[in-house]
Every structure is written in structure tokens, then in C-alpha cells.
Amino acid sequence: MKKLGFMLMALLVGVFIAVQPAEAAYLSEHDKYVEVSNEEARQLADLLGLKDIPLGEETAKLSFQYQEELIAKIETQFNIEIDHYYIWLTVNGEPVLGIDPPFAMY
């Protein structure tokens, strides 16, 4: 009986050490890439408040960083974790804008 109790205790301790809680994160495997024209990208960027800001790789990086910082602040403020992904608008195959769409949480 002692052996069985010891084995169960060792198993429980091992499970607590080995199993980590799931963490919310940027899920790059769910990213979508949408090819658009310069005009379409410009219209969408204007709708997002990026009027008169030139679009390109740098803008894509900045939009990604800004949204990542915003998500981190929301997670900290409300003590929640949010899984998210991006829709990357591309012109001639180059990302020009990253958009974090709403992701349904169940």
C-alpha cells in the first residue's frame, strides 16, 4: 500500500511540474495574407487612422508592434490572456499593413 501511495504522489508531483497552463499568444500559424492594390491598401489604412502615412514594410512592422503593445496592456489591465492573429495586407507580395481582427473567445 505504501508503494502505491508513493507512486501516486510521485505521479502527481510529476504532473504538476511537467504540465504548464496554456498561455495566450500571437498565433502566427493563423495569419492570413491578402493581396490588395496600392489604392485598396491606402483606403483601408485611412480607415484605421493612418491617413497620409506612407505604406510599406516599415508601416507593417509599426502596425504590428503597436497592436501587440495594445494587446499586452489589455491583458495586464484586465488580467486576461488573448489569443490573436493578423491579417497582413500585401502589395506585390510585400506586407504593407498588419491588422489584428477580433477573434471570437468561447
Image (spheres, rainbow, N blue to C red):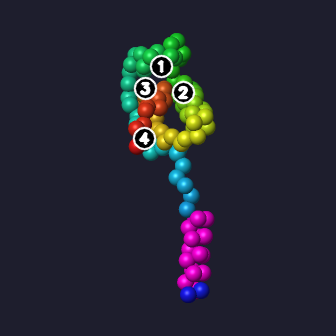
The secondary element bearing badge 4 is classed as loop
Residue hosting label 3 = 91
Farthest residue to the front: give it. Answer: 1
Residue 101 image label: none
Image x and y of residue 11, in percent: 56, 74
Frontmost of labels 1 and 3 is: 1
Query: Could you tell me the amino acid type at mark 1?
Result: Leu
Residue hosting label 2 = 63
Q: Is residue 72 above or below residue 47?
A: below
Q: Quarter holding the N terminus?
A: bottom right
Say which residue appears at 55% left-offset and 77% top-offset.
8
Q: Is residue 3 left or right of residue 85?
A: right
Q: Out of 41 and 84, give the one closest to the viewer.
A: 84
C-alpha separation, residue under disc 4 versus residue under disc 1: 23 Å
Report the magenta stretch's main SS: helix
C-alpha separation, residue under disc 2 versus residue under disc 4: 23 Å
Image x and y of residue 45, in percent: 46, 19
C-alpha separation, residue under disc 1 versus residue under disc 3: 17 Å
The reply to whether residue 26 is in sight is no
Residue hosting label 1 = 48
Query: Could you tell me the amino acid type at mark 2?
Result: Ser
Say which residue appears at 40% left-offset and 43% top-offset.
106
Instruction: Examine the image and state in which quarter residue 91 appears.
Output: top left
Q: Reading the chain from its start, which is encountered first: label 3 or label 2?
A: 2
Frontmost of labels 2 and 4 is: 4
Q: Out of 63 and 54, give the one closest to the viewer.
A: 63
